[in-house]
Amino acid sequence: MSATPQKNRATRRVLAAAAGLATVGALVAAMPAGAHDRGNGHGHGNGHKPRTVDVQLLSFNDLHGNLEPPAGSAGNVSETQPDGTVKAIPAGGVEYLATSLRTARKGNPYSVTAAGGDMVGASPLLSGLFHDEPTIEALNGLDLDVTAVGNHEFDEGAAELARLQNGGCHPVEGCYEKGKKFKGADFPYLAANVTKEKTGRPLLKPYTVWKKNGVKIGFIGVTLEGTPDIVTANGVKGLKFHDEVETINKYARELDRKGVKSIVALIHEGGAPASTSYNYDCDSPGAGDGISGPIVDIAKGITPKVDALVTGHTHQAYVCTVPDPSGKPRMVTSASSFGKLYTDTTLTYDRRTKDIVRTSVKSANHVVTRDQAKATDMTRLIDRWNKLAAPIASKPQGWISADINGRGSTAPEKPLGNVISDAQLEGLAPADKGGAEVAFMNPGGIRADLVHKASGGEGDGVVTYGEAFTVQPFTNMMNVVDLTGAQLVTALQQQVSGSNAASPKILQVSKGLTYTLDLTKSGADRVVADTIKLNGEAIDPARTYRVAMNEFLAGGGDGFAALGEGTNKLVGASDLDLFNAYLAAHSTAAAPLAPPATDRITVIQ
């Protein structure tokens, strides 16, 4: 999902020793993934190899460093029951994901595991505090064979992505464990559509070929072309992002020339199924009828040489068949997010043609339930890193009386969005702090809910530093800028128009700002201009307002070009510091913070 990345997280990390960005060096190509010794065959015996063999493709996407089960509603998947009711099932956590994948592989000698990007970035404190080294270590332990890069792999820039791939201790913070050097990923990150501006050469490997007993499957990995729109400028400095379809078709031709006829595309871009239930049939009434969004057009443009698409980015669950350019159905899958689901796809490989028998491709999503045995090696990994994080993670920041939903809220105005924007306004309203009159928060930057139930030994209702960090993991610096009333109105209209027309991004607004969102209208008209008021007064188009927002929005991120036009900028504290200060100022054990009313945006459906 789009989110709020931050410039040079290292300089603002709790454990940071000094400031500084690593120099972007040459990125060393990764070692090819080791094929696992696993598969099933069809055909005749008599000592001959069978004509076809079933290859199991296990896949997942958008893990975002969620090593522990995600808390609250963000840790549930929806399942439609036979009677039509929908049940929430707690899911996720790498201890359970490891068990699920290992169980699924049993009896499948030909098994390959792939991912659709955003394995790291916007991670909870347990991984984020250590620049996601714990997650890469966990993925190595899960026997991941290959992944595409997602937009979040660029949050800390190309040099940090290279370090995650190739290993080596952090350039500023060094090695986290005495006598231990970070080894890096033992699977390749693929970035076929990302090139270096200076040389035009690919940043990382565009594809890899998985091989076993003469069976060969090529994997091409791409991230969404719009990555620069949702990552801060420093994260994508010196890089170019190219069209997903053109790139995949180019490398599919190259693989085909090399004799690799079976090809899977790993695409960090996705769609929106008509239902959020993981077991919804999105081929109803016809192939691909139940899914919309960017992945549909991408799938329709990708050469028939590609046999299946593993997708991500939208954090949705779907298993659909979308017609390829020749009109034949082709499998397109996504496994929600945070390790809550995995997809099990059967690819029937024909040894004679070296291709996948497309009519035999079967796929299903499975819940990573928390009632199965934990993988002990993952438990040890989590315990080891938790011990290092504990002195910082367990520190109380405030108290809440009930869950305050952010990520888990599907409403345009989220209770936690109101808390965050109010915290930003309060912290930056003093004249010497910027004189802010209103604050905006982008919804993708809210990464979790504040959950009342204790996550450790802190007690129910206590918000720890680790929990606050999980909500606001980017440590974005805040900006206060001058914007005219006309620019403010345009910014609010950009929530539902331009690049956000098909999938609105509704800003969370601080108290005092009110307006009507009429979803029966289309485009910019959905924001009813004459209803926009600040502290009860209509916005004056000619007047200058002081507006607080994180540096990502202030750079025009997420399609908010109008917010990027601000002048007279003052740089304030980080979003996380303001959030924690607000919790401390507005809650005690005796008087915890209650979920706020959501009455700032009037929604007409």
Image (tube, rainbow, N blue to C red):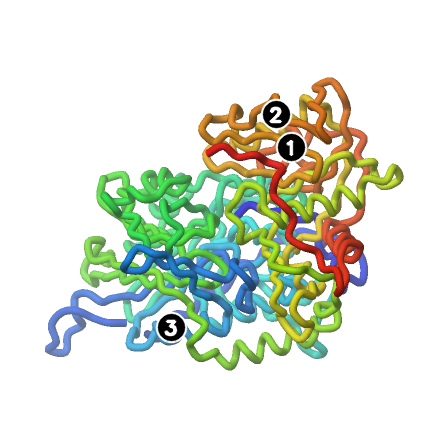
Q: Amino acid at mark 1?
A: Thr
Residue position marked by numbered label 2 in the rendering: 531
In front here: 461 or 349?
461
Residue at the spot 20% in from the left edge and 61% down from the top edge: 350
Sequence order check, earlier mark of 3 and 2: 3
Relative side of 505 to 396, left or right: left
Q: Residue 307 at x, y = what percent?
A: 29, 52
Q: Is residue 222 placed above or below 387 in the rendered structure?
A: above
Q: Amino acid at mark 2?
A: Thr
The answer to whether the residue labelled 2 contacts the one labelled 1, judged by CB atoms less than 8 Å apart, is yes
**Residue 493 lies in what quarter of the image?**
top right
Q: Is residue 448 placed above or below 47 in the rendered structure?
A: above
Relative side of 447 to 367, left or right: right
Q: Residues within 10 Å of mark 1 (few under 14, many from 20)?
A: many
Residue position marked by numbered label 1 in the rendering: 514
Q: Nearer the viewer, mark 1 or mark 3?
A: 1
Real-space CA distance between mark 1 and mark 3, rounded to the nearest whole angstrom = 57 Å
Q: Residue 448 at x, y = what percent?
A: 59, 56
Q: Residue 148 at x, y = what percent?
A: 47, 54
Q: Amino acid at mark 3?
A: His
Residue at the spot 79% in from the left edge and 48% down from the top edge: 573
In front here: 550 or 603?
603
Sequence order check, earlier mark of 2 and 1: 1
Give the numbered dot on residue 36.
3
